[in-house]
Image (cartoon, rainbow, N blue to C red):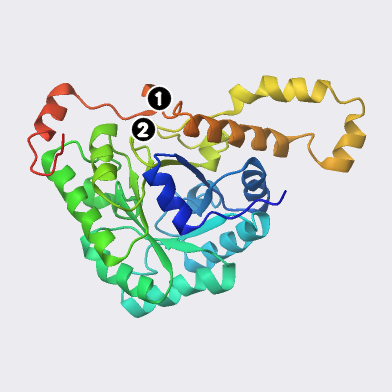
């Protein structure tokens, strides 16, 4: 049976029912195909593709043309999946007009269903303009890689009252501006969970603990396919599916014929198994567990509870 694309209404209902969304980044045809076959809810064409696919040291050099190239390939690989295009640095900051123009490129040239951009209150005018143009817009708060210099590098967010309250206020502003969802990055579970509980729209996490409305991981981290570094919160699922793959292959009499007929004899099959395992763990609450959550000290959490934005 052909996979059906999730809708905005379904995403909202899943939040209300506390059903976890499992989504992933992808940048090419084969991995996006694997993700759709595995039953992934959404795919983000992240500007992280500049690092894991093109070898840039950061996401900052990535251009719109490179993102459109990624997005077209992902749409071909996952025609029935909700796909979000990540607005790269320089594509939306200058003006509302340039932001809308570049967001429209994702929709018209690559068939994306939505776009994502970084920044809170300072970007609400852009979010509003893109939303008014009829394009679904997701916000991105916490650690925002395009502007890590303002945080002093890749640092966990939401551990101080100032950082937590700024995140809450930015989230409220994005919701008011028309964002359909927000991605929180690199936060401990408790402050991220506070944001998820207080807002009407879905709040998803990447390295933001286990109290958000869903989880995002980078495909290359899940696959152990990026050699430069791996974030604290990222889990490689390959070791967990190798035995399953070995057992699967052992049941096939003619490997060559099977490969010719199905192409399910190699890396594509291992990738699909790994993604299925990830989806299952997200939905049953097994991922992320404590090994993949940024810790917060008891005294830091006690201090956060004094915030005027904290709700018991």
Looking at this rendering, what residue extends furthest in the bottom direction?
97
Name the one closer to the observer, 309 or 52: 309
Answer few, some or many: residues within 10 Å of disc 2's Cα (few below 14, many 20 plus, some between 14 and 19): many
Name the one closer to the observer, 306 or 72: 306
* Spot occupied by residue 260 in the image (x, y as percentages of width and height): 89, 41
In the rendered view, would you say 167 is above or below 284?
Answer: below
Which residue is rendered at x = 25% and y = 63% of the image? Answer: 176
Under circle 1, the secondary element is loop
Which residue is rendered at x = 19% and y = 24% of the image? Answer: 297
In the rendered view, would you say 56 is above or below 189?
Answer: below
* Spot occupied by residue 159 in the image (x, y as percentages of width and height): 19, 36
Which residue is rendered at x = 58% and y = 35% of the image? Answer: 223
* Spot occupied by residue 257 in the image (x, y as percentages of width and height): 92, 36
187 left or right of 163?
A: right
Q: Where is residue 174, by image quadrant?
A: bottom left
Answer whether labels 1 and 2 touch (C-beta < 8 Å).
yes
Q: Which mark is residue 289?
A: 1
Q: Which mark is residue 86?
A: none
* Spot occupied by residue 106 in the image (x, y as percentages of width and height): 51, 68
Does residue 58 appear in the picture of this structure? no
In the rendered view, would you say 167 is above or below 69?
Answer: above
Distance Cα–Cα, label 1 vs label 2: 7 Å
Which residue is rendered at x = 90% and y = 34% of the image? Answer: 256
The C terminus, quarter of image: top left
Under circle 2, the secondary element is loop
Name the one closer to the observer, 120 or 14: 14
Q: Which mark is residue 210?
A: 2
238 left or right of 15?
A: right
């Amino acid at each position: 049976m052909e996979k059906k694309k999730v809708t905005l209404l379904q995403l909202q209902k899943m939040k209300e029912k506390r059903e976890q969304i499992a989504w992933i980044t992808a940048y090419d045809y084969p991995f996006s195909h694997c993700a759709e076959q595995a039953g992934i809810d959404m795919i983000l064409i992240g500007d992280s593709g500049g690092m894991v696919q093109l070898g840039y040291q950061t996401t900052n050099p990535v251009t719109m043309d490179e993102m459109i190239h990624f997005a077209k390939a992902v749409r071909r690989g996952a025609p029935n999946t909700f796909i979000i295009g990540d607005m790269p640095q320089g594509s939306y900051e200058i003006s509302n007009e340039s932001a809308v123009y570049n967001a429209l490129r994702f929709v018209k040239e690559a068939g994306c269903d939505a776009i994502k951009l970084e920044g809170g209150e300072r970007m609400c005018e852009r979010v509003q303009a893109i939303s008014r143009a009829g394009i679904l817009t997701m916000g991105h708060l916490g650690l925002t890689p395009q502007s890590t210099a303002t945080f002093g590098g890749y640092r966990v967010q939401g551990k101080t009252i100032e950082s937590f309250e700024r995140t809450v206020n930015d989230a409220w502003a994005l919701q008011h501006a028309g964002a359909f969802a927000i991605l929180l990055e690199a936060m401990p579970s408790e402050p991220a969970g506070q944001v998820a509980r207080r807002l009407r729209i879905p709040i998803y996490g990447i390295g933001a603990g286990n109290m958000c409305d869903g989880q995002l991981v980078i495909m290359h981290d899940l696959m152990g396919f990026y050699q430069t570094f791996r974030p604290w919160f990222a889990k490689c699922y390959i070791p967990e599916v190798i035995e399953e793959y070995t057992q699967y292959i052992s049941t096939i009499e003619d490997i060559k014929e099977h490969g010719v007929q199905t192409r399910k004899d190699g890396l594509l099959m291992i990738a699909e198994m790994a993604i299925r395992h990830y989806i299952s763990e997200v939905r049953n609450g097994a991922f992320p567990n404590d090994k993949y959550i940024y810790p917060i000290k008891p005294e830091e959490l006690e201090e956060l509870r004094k915030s005027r934005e904290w709700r018991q």
